[in-house]
Every structure is written in C-alpha cells, then in structure tokens.
Amino acid sequence: MTDVPATKGHVLLVDDDAFLLDMYALKFKNAGYEVSAINDPQEAVDKLKGDLKPDIILFDIVMPGIGGWGFAEQVRTNNLSEHATLIVLSNQGQQSDFETSKKYNVDGYIVKALSTPSEVLQEVEKIHNK
C-alpha cells in the first residue's frame, strides 16, 4: 500500500479560456493542490450543488452563459462551498468590477494581466491563508 501525499487543498478553476485553464491547473497541481478545472460557469455551479467541495474557487468574470458574476451570485445565494475562498481571476480591472466583487462577498481579486502564474499562486495562497 502506497501513501498518498496530503494535498494543500482542492482548487476549483472556472474559466472559458482552455489555455489559461490548463496553465493554471498545472501550476496549482505542481504546487501540491488537487485541481478541478471547468470551462463553463453553469457546469461549475451544478458540480458544486453535487459533491464538489473545493477549498478555493478561482473564477473569471467574462464567460458565456451566466458569466462570472452569475456564477458568484449562485455560489453565494445557494451557500455552495460556503467555507471556500472565492477569488476573481480576470483581466477585468475596472473600479466597477471591484465594487461588484464586494457585492458578492468575494475574498480576493487578481488581475491576470498584471500577474505571472507564479504570482497568482502566491496571491491565492496569501488570500486563502488570511
């Protein structure tokens, strides 16, 4: 019987950009996290209503369907993963976006274009470990 190393936690990535989804999934896996990567916000909501219980949720804002804010609203309104750290990971960095993130009680906001994947990982860990 082999020992399975403990992970740092479970990260849910929600982004419709397949390249970024794969890149961040690999970054977090290599850092010791279990990762679920989903490219559709409604599918992510459905999985959270099921048995998916992440410790950290990273989501983009601009996505088809319900979009990122619709996703955040569903997560908060339905108490999905109420103990998870909810973090926006988007290229949107307008003041209105920061205000909207407060409306949904988002724990952190990271602008992708201003951060390398390593910096995103560090910032996520900093926000999660507050």
Image (tube, grey):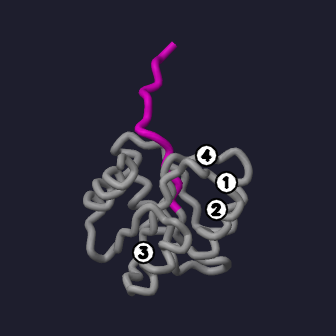
Pointer 4 residue: 53
Q: Position of residue 96 (x, y in %)?
A: 45, 86
Residue at 53 percent of width and 54 percent of height: 12
Magenta segment, which residues?
A: 1-13
Residue at coordinates 42% horizontally, 69% vertically from top-left?
89
Comparing marks 3 and 2, which lies closer to the viewer? 2
Residue 30 horizontal/vertical position (percent): 35, 45
Rounded to the nearest angstrom, the CA distance separating label 1 from label 2 is 8 Å
**In 3D space, how far apart are the residues under numbered discs 3 and 4 (Cα atoms)?**
22 Å
Label 2: which secondary element = helix
Q: Which residue is mark 1?
A: 48
Earlier in the chain: of badge 3 and badge 2, it is 2
Q: Secondary structure at mark 4?
A: loop
Disc 1 versus disc 4: distance between alpha carbons? Answer: 6 Å
Residue occupying the far top of the picture: 1
Q: Earlier in the sequence, mark 1 or mark 4?
A: 1
The residue at which mark 3 appears reads as 90
